[in-house]
Amino acid sequence: MNTSKRSLSIKKISALAIFSALSYLSLYVFRIPGIGGFLTFDIKDTIVCLAAMIFGPFSGAAVSLLAALIEMVTVSGTGPWGFLMNFLSTAAFAFSASAVYMYIPKLKKTMKGAISGLLAAIFASTVVMLVLNIFVTPVYLGVPRDAVFEMLVPLLLPFNFLKYVLNAALVLVLYKPIKEVLRKTKFIRSSSENYKFDKKSLLLTICGLALIVACLLIFVFVMDGNLQFFKK
C-alpha cells in the first residue's frame, strides 16, 4: 500500500512538472499579442487550471508559481512585479475553479460544479487583475496611476474578462479528454467516473467552442490582436 501511494505521489509530481513545462512552452506555441496595442493573450492559464482541476487547487497554485518563475527568468521583461501579477492572476483563476469543483459538497466533481467553478474563476481573476492593474501596473510599467485608470473601462477590464472567459471555455472543452489520457497513462487512479461523451458533454463542448471562437474574433477583429503561432 505504501509502495502504491509512493508511486502515485511520484507520478503526481511528474505530471505537475509536465503541466509546468507545457504552460511555459505554450507561450511559444500560441499567442495573441498587440491587443489594445500592448496586451497579450496566451493559453498558459488554461494549462495551469487543468492541473488544478485534476490534482487540486494547491497543486494548481504550485504549477502557477513554477511557471511564473520560469517565465520571469527567460522571456519576461517585467521583472519581479510582472512575476507577481503573473503568479497571482493565474493562481486566482486555477485555485478558485478547482476549489469550487473539488470541495463544494453539492457541486463536487460534477458538470454543474465545473461550470460553477469556472464562473467563480472568471469573476475572482477579473477582480484580482483589477486590483493589480490599479496598484502594481503603474509601478512596473512606470506610468502614472491616472493613465492606468483611463484604460480600465475601455481596455483592461474587457481584456481581462474575455481572457478568462476564453481560458474557461478551453478548460471546459479539454478537461475530460486530458483527464482520460492521464488515467490511461496511469498518472492518476482509475475511478468509477468513466469518460462518456453523452448529449450533455456534446452540448457543453459546442458551447465551449462557440465561446472560444467568439472571444478569438473579438481579440483579433475588435481589439486589434494578431494571431501568432510557434513564436521563435
Image (cartoon, rainbow, N blue to C red):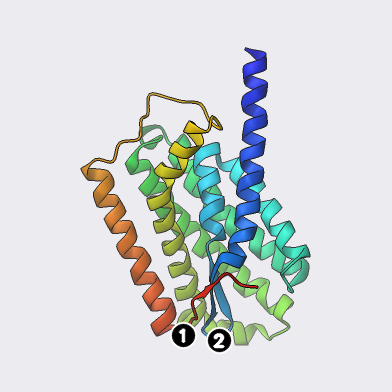
| Cα separation between marks 2 and 1 | 8 Å
* Residue 61 visible in image: no
Residue at numbered disc 1 = 224
Residue 217 to residue 124: above or below: below
- Expressed as whole percent of the image width and height from the top left, the position of residue 142 reads 73, 83
User: For mark 2, what is the residue?
Assistant: 37
| Quadrant (top left, top right, bottom left, bottom right) of the N terminus | top right
- Of helix, strand and loop, which one carries label 1? loop
What residue sits 54% from the left and 29% below the top?
186
Give me the disc on residue 158.
none
Q: Which of marks 2 and 1 is nearer the N terminus?
A: 2
Which of 144/87 is in front? 87
Between 222 and 92, the residue placed more toward the observer is 222
Residue at 67% of width from left, 44% of height from top? 17
Label 1, residues with CA under 10 Å away: few <14, some 14-19, many ≥20: some
Discs 2, 1 touching: Cβ within 8 Å: yes
Q: Is mark 2 on a helix, strand or loop?
A: loop
At horizontal 61% and vertical 74% (from top left) the residue drawn is 134
Indicate whether 221 appears above or below 55: below
Quadrant of residue 112 within the rendered picture: top left
